[in-house]
Image (cartoon, rainbow, N blue to C red):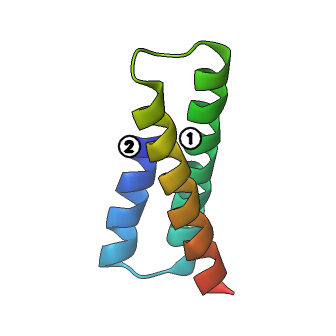
Amino acid sequence: MLLLAMTLLGIWQIAPNWPYLVLSLSYVIGAAISILIREGLSPSTQPQATQITAVLLLIISLYGFAQLL
């Protein structure tokens, strides 16, 4: 999901159409929530770093959505 979001962000940089940005941000939000749920169900060896990364992804993508409004 994150690879697809990065690809869509790359396309958005070339052709700045807002649907690419919205779709990539929604993929990032989905991936971050999926990471947080996976960490909640079965914690990894470095859970804090993974959780911090997922929360940062959520904050950045929600900020991106707020900028579109």
Measured from the top left, where is residue 62 in percent x and y? 62, 67
Q: Tell me if 39 is positioned left or right of 8 in this view.
A: right
Q: Quadrant of the C terminus?
A: bottom right
Check contact, mark 2 vs mark 1: CB within 8 A. Answer: no
Say which element carries label 2. Answer: helix
Say which element carries label 1. Answer: helix
In this rendered view, identify the residue nearer to me: 11 or 50. 50
Q: Residue at x 37, y 79 (%)?
A: 15
Q: Residue at x 49, y 55 (%)?
A: 56
Q: Residue at x 58, y 55 (%)?
A: 58
Measured from the top left, where is residue 37 in percent x and y? 67, 28
- Amino acid tagged 2: Leu
Identify the residue at the far front of this view.
Answer: 48
- Mark 2 and mark 1: span between their CA atoms? 10 Å
Residue labelled with disc 2: 3
Q: Tell me if 6 is positioned left or right of 18 in this view.
A: left
In the depicted structure, whether residue 1 falls above or below residue 26:
above
- Amino acid tagged 1: Ala
Residue mark closest to the camera, 2 vs 1 = 1
Within-10-Å neighbours for mark 1: few <14, some 14–19, many 20+: some
In the depicted structure, whether residue 2 falls above or below residue 58:
above
Please tell me the numbered disc located at residue 19: none
Residue labelled with disc 1: 31
